[in-house]
């Protein structure tokens, strides 16, 4: 059966440029309103959010530390692999720093939590302009993108953050220690560990659609493995603090996603080649 190339939605009169702008504005307004509402809720729950979530990786009771100690005991190594964060106090350094960090963190967490809705609004704006077969092939894209984003955020929070805090706070140079990092510095690093990782985890989805339209092939991705690995190392250095351990904690799973994306590209590119034969 031949696939149809009709738009998903047809109308008697095509939308003008200003109609598209008005439609885009309505989607953006809804996305902003949802983000603001979530940010306000996060701000109102500031004590709980900071105590349980933001400051979580700085405590020995954090699940990642307990899991590592449990794993070390299970494999018969006792407490040799057991890891706990160094003791330190977070100290606001400037007037108003606590307030402004609270606001900034609430906005960023609002954007992160609203990501599924924001992406859905973008999709609803783009979808009417797609052909029917294109729309069918993109079914479930909002759920997949949201799941990948949250997987990246959780990876950054539970895997990268504990190791990075252990290394960065415990690092000493000529008697200088990080026993009392500023509130702004600490929260900035926690956010950096999560949000960029969530965005980078969209790689399989991007490769899926690029290979589906023939722009990326598995042979191309295999041929440029070394260059891709170098690029991933550079990217990890940009989005993480300047320490090798944290960079590799980010780079290794991203490269794993690259290898998984080759498998995805192989399947989708084969379908693309059959469609043009």
Image (spheres, rainbow, N blue to C red):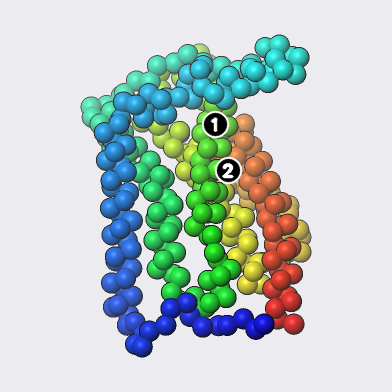
> Mark 2 — residue?
236
Q: From this view, report whether residue 31 is shown above or below residue 196.
A: below
Q: Quadrant of residue 100?
A: top left
Q: Secondary structure at mark 1?
A: helix
- The percent position of residue 182, horizontal first and vertical second, equals 37, 25
Number of marks in the rendered image: 2
Q: Going by the picture, which residue comes out furthest to the top?
A: 78
Is tag 1's residue or tag 2's residue first in the polypeptide sequence? Answer: 1
* In this rendering, position of residue 214 left or right of residue 105: right
Q: Quadrant of the N terminus?
A: bottom right
Q: Secondary structure at mark 2?
A: helix
Is disc 2 surrounded by few (<14), some (14 to 19) or many (20+) residues within 10 Å? many
> Mark 1 — residue?
158
Is disc 1 surrounded by few (<14), some (14 to 19) or many (20+) residues within 10 Å? some
Q: Residue at x 63, y 60 (%)?
A: 207
* Cα gap from disc 1 to disc 2, whole angstroms: 17 Å
Q: Quadrant of the C terminus?
A: bottom right
* In this rendering, position of residue 105 left or right of residue 197: left
Q: Residue at x 73, y 63 (%)?
A: 267
- The percent position of residue 263, horizontal first and vertical second, equals 73, 57
């Amino acid at each position: 059966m031949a696939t149809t190339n009709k738009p998903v939605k047809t109308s008697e009169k095509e939308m003008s440029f200003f109609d598209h702008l008005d439609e885009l504005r309505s989607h953006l307004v809804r996305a902003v309103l949802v983000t603001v509402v979530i940010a306000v809720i996060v701000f109102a729950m500031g004590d709980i959010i900071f105590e349980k979530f933001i400051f979580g990786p700085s405590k020995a009771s954090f699940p990642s530390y307990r899991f590592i100690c449990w794993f070390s005991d299970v494999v018969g190594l006792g407490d040799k692999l057991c890891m706990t964060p160094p003791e330190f106090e977070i100290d606001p350094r400037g007037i108003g720093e606590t307030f402004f960090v609270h606001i900034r963190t609430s906005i960023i967490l609002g954007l992160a939590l609203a990501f599924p809705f924001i992406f859905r609004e973008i999709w609803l704006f783009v979808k009417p302009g797609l052909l029917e077969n294109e729309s069918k092939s993109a079914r479930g894209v909002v759920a997949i993108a949201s799941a990948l984003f949250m997987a990246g955020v959780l990876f950054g929070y539970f895997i990268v953050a504990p190791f990075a805090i252990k290394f960065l706070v415990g690092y000493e140079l000529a008697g200088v220690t990080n026993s009392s990092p500023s509130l702004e510095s600490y929260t900035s690093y926690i956010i950096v560990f999560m949000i960029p990782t969530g965005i980078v985890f969209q790689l399989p989805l991007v490769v899926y659609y690029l290979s589906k339209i023939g722009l990326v092939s598995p042979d191309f991705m295999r041929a440029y493995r070394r260059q891709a690995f170098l690029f991933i190392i550079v990217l990890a250095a940009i989005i993480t603090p300047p320490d090798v351990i944290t960079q590799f904690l980010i780079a290794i799973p991203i490269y794993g996603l690259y290898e998984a994306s080759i498998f995805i590209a192989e399947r989708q590119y084969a379908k693309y080649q059959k469609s043009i034969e």
